[in-house]
């Protein structure tokens, strides 16, 4: 245990609202539970679920920190009594249950990973949320296999970039959708085999053309209702649709369900945050074994669009809500 201050700066979102509610405030430094490490946060990641939590539509699960922030990288400064792997001074990144928009954040040991070799805090902090989510959904629920074709919607979102990279590195043929020609060019840079500007092209028509009418094996979708019918149309026999968000609405007024039966489709989805520590720990072990070596080898890596000082979290959220970014938005807390 190092000499820790009693209090820390964190970003308060008060009773919720627009980005302007995000202001620096003071709170006690959290005490780690027996299975947690306390991290001195160097960099935290900004994710779309933070925007939803800030605006009041995504409350934290019971027992989680009410402070925003689902991922960070930094240095271990204290360990709970049951922690076995990490010691004070270790450089780690963590999928947190909340609380990363702060100088100190407690996270379960099981959800904590070492920085990939050669990484700094900025790049390490950009990993957990998107890698845990894509690992669980593309390869877990989506059952993506080598040689399959994958469609990633929101190809330049934090999640989308990671999905393109992982699908590609594990042997997929990858198509991505995005909202501008510049974003489509970025998808190709990240490794996509084809990119579809959904504002100027019908993605279902393009998928049909690109696959000789066969369709894709897996779709990772964050748009939801607005894409549902076209997603069903775009899937091949035995295809899997994995829903991870509803940026385009969670209702479908009218749908033709026949493709599900006729093509033996699977419609599934999940959220990351309510999973148990044991479930998240299993994902962490899979990532460390299968993905961390590839990150260390520089085969691909996080795409950081911009980072802001912690005190400018409101600006970071404004940028995220503008959807002008390509890749990750970060908050730098301390060197
Ligand atoms: N289920 C889970 O476990 C889980 C975990 C983490 C995140 N998520 C969700 O995954 C999504 C991506 O998260 P992120 O942090 O990577 O977000 P992000 O970086 O902010 O990216 C979201 C992107 O989606 C696109 N978009 C926004 N509204 C759209 C619409 N109506 N139709 C089509 N595309 C739209 C935008 O790009 P364009 O310019 O291309 O439209 C935007 O840049 C979020 O909805 C988040 O809540 C789910």
Image: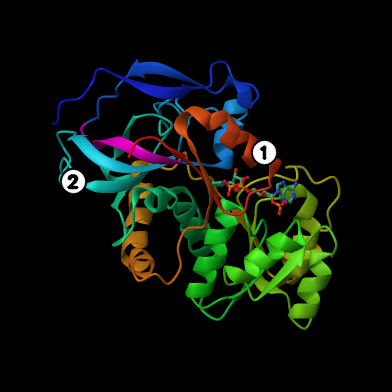
Image coordinates of residue 23 in percent, x first then y, are 52, 21
Q: Main secondary structure of the magenta part?
A: strand
| Residue designated by label 2 | 86
Residue drawn where x is 80% and y is 63% of the image: 258
Instruction: Determine whether 44 is above or below 224 in the image.
Output: above
Q: CA distance from mark 2 to mark 1?
A: 36 Å
Can residue 239 be seen in the rendering of this structure? no
Q: Quadrant of the C terminus?
A: top left
Spot the residue most to the bottom.
212
Range drawn in magenta: 34-44
Residue drawn where x is 23% and y is 21% of the image: 5
Image coordinates of residue 271 in percent, x first then y, are 53, 45
Horizontal side of 163 relative to 219 (left or right) equals left
| Residue designated by label 1 | 321
Instruction: Determine whether 109 is above or below 211 in the image.
Output: above
Image coordinates of residue 226 in percent, x first then y, are 79, 50
Q: Quadrant of residue 188?
A: bottom right
Asked which secondary structure carries label 2, the reply is loop
Q: Nearer the viewer, residue 230 or 162?
A: 162
Can residue 138 be seen in the rendering of this structure? yes
Say which of marks 2 and 1 sits in front.
1
Q: Nearer the viewer, residue 263 or 333?
A: 333
Q: Is residue 69 magenta?
A: no
Instruction: Determine whether 8 is above or below 152 in the image.
Output: above
Residue 54: assigned label = none
Residue drawn where x is 18% and y is 46% of the image: 86
Q: Quadrant of residue 184?
A: bottom right
Image coordinates of residue 112 in percent, x first then y, are 30, 47
Q: Quadrant of residue 253?
A: top right
Horizontal side of 48 relative to 118 (left or right) equals right
Q: Quadrant of the N terminus?
A: top left
Asked which secondary structure carries label 1, the reply is helix
């Amino acid at each position: 245990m190092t000499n820790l201050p009693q209090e820390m700066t964190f970003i308060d979102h008060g009773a919720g609202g627009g980005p302007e509610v995000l202001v620096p405030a003071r709170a006690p430094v959290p005490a780690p539970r027996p299975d947690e490490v306390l991290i001195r946060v160097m960099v935290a990641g900004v994710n779309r679920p933070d925007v939803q939590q800030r605006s009041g539509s995504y409350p934290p699960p019971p027992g989680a920190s009410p402070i925003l922030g689902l991922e960070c990288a930094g240095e271990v400064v204290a360990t709970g009594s049951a922690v076995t792997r990490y010691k004070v001074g270790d450089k780690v990144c963590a999928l947190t249950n909340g609380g990363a928009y702060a100088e100190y954040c407690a996270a379960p040991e099981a959800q904590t990973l070492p920085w990939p070799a050669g990484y700094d805090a900025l790049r390490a902090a950009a990993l957990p949320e998107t890698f845990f989510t894509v690992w669980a959904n593309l390869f877990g629920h989506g059952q993506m296999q080598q040689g399959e074709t994958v469609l990633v919607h929101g190809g330049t979102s934090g999640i989308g970039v990671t999905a393109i990279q992982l699908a590609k590195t594990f042997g997929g043929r990858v198509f991505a959708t995005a909202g501008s020609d510049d974003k489509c060019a970025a998808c190709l840079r990240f490794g996509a085999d084809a990119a579809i500007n959904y504002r100027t092209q019908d993605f279902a028509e393009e998928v049909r053309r690109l696959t000789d009418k066969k369709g894709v094996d897996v779709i990772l979708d964050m748009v939801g209702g607005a894409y549902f019918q076209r997603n069903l149309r775009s899937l091949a026999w035995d295809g899997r649709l994995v829903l991870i968000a509803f940026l385009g609405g969670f209702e479908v007024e009218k749908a033709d369900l026949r493709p599900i039966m006729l093509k033996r489709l699977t419609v599934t989805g999940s959220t990351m945050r309510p999973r148990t520590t044991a479930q998240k720990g299993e994902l962490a072990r899979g990532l460390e074994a299968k993905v961390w070596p590839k990150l260390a080898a520089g085969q691909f890596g996080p795409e950081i669009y911009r980072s802001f000082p912690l005190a400018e979290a409101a600006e970071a959220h404004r940028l995220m809500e503008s959807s002008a970014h390509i890749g990750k938005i970060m908050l730098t807390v301390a060197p």
